[in-house]
Image: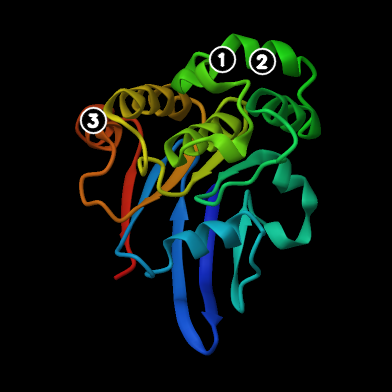
Amino acid sequence: MDKSYISINNLCKSFDNTKIIDNLSFSINQGDLVKISGKNGSGKSTLLKIFAQIYKQDAGEIRLEGENINNSSKYKSKISYCSTDFIYYRDLTVKKNIIFYFRIIGEKNYKELYEKNKKFLNLEEFEHFYPENLSNGQKKKMNLFRALVPRFEIYLIDEPENGLDKESLNELDQKLEALIAQNTILYTSHNVNSLNFFEKTKKELKLWKIYQKFFW
């Protein structure tokens, strides 16, 4: 019996008769940092969206703690997904958007959680702006804040470094370093080197197995 924390078995997904993911299988242990690398269109984002139950696979399965995630809704509460798409309510400010999201996912002290963390990625500098008035970089920060600040068991992050300046990348590195101590992270990148944290973890933090899957 497979005792892996996460197991992906013979996963397949096609769009318009074009195979995007073809018979993919691998396993992940709890606490792993998983970097999924590959060029544009290689299936990185599709894989995360299947995991987040936004897309449904054509064949195969993803199991979490031995159970097929498609057979139970409870696993959605364990998974945080940060998309490259910008999702927000137009009539709410950045701050109100995020607080509303924290309430939806069941955070009891949602206002306190926001106030305690609003310096992360300098969100407080544009918290009173409406999302449509933000730059793409600010929207990216909003997405990352919403996904990474609440506590989850698994974080799925699609192209986290895109659109961020050097200061924000350093903050993101520090945040991921703190999260990986107790959580499992999968993130995609078409960059070979990507985040500094991945390189640092690979070289220094020997407690976690590092995967680098390529979908060329």
Kind of residue sitting beneath label 1: Asn
Given residues 74 and 63, the one toward you in this image is 74
CA–CA distance in space, label 1 to label 2: 6 Å
Amino acid tagged 3: Lys
Number of residues whose C-alpha sits closer than 10 Å to that of mark 3, classed few (under 14), some (14–19) or many (20 or more): few
N-terminal-most mark, 3 or 2: 2
Q: Amino acid at mark 2?
A: Leu
Residue that extends furthest to the front in the rendered view of this protein: 133
When the figure is inspected, residue 133 is found, relative to residue 150, above or below; the finding is below
Q: CA distance from mark 1 to mark 3?
A: 24 Å
Q: Secondary structure at mark 1?
A: helix
Q: CA distance from mark 3 to mark 2?
A: 29 Å
Does residue 196 sit above or below 95 in this rendering? below
In terms of secondary structure, where does tag 3 sit? helix
- Please state, as top left, top right, bottom left or bottom right, where the C terminus lies in the image: bottom left
CB contact under 8 Å: marks 1 and 2: yes
What percent of the width, then of the height, locates residue 142? Answer: 55, 32
Residue appearing at x 53%, y 81% in the figure = 14
Q: Is residue 71 left or right of residue 154?
A: right
Q: Is residue 184 left or right of residue 80?
A: left
In this figure, which residue is indicated by the disc labeled 1?
A: 117
Residue 113: which disc? 2
Residue 165 in sight here:
yes
Q: Is residue 168 above or below residue 83?
A: above
Front position among marks 1 and 3:
1
Residue at 72% across, 25% down: 96
What number is the disc on residue 200? 3
Is the residue marked by circle 1 packed among few (<14), some (14-19), or many (20+) residues within 10 Å? some
Tell me what residue is drawn at x 38 percent, y 70 percent: 41
As drawn, is 125 to the left or to the right of 202? right
Q: Residue at x 32, y 44 (%)?
A: 210
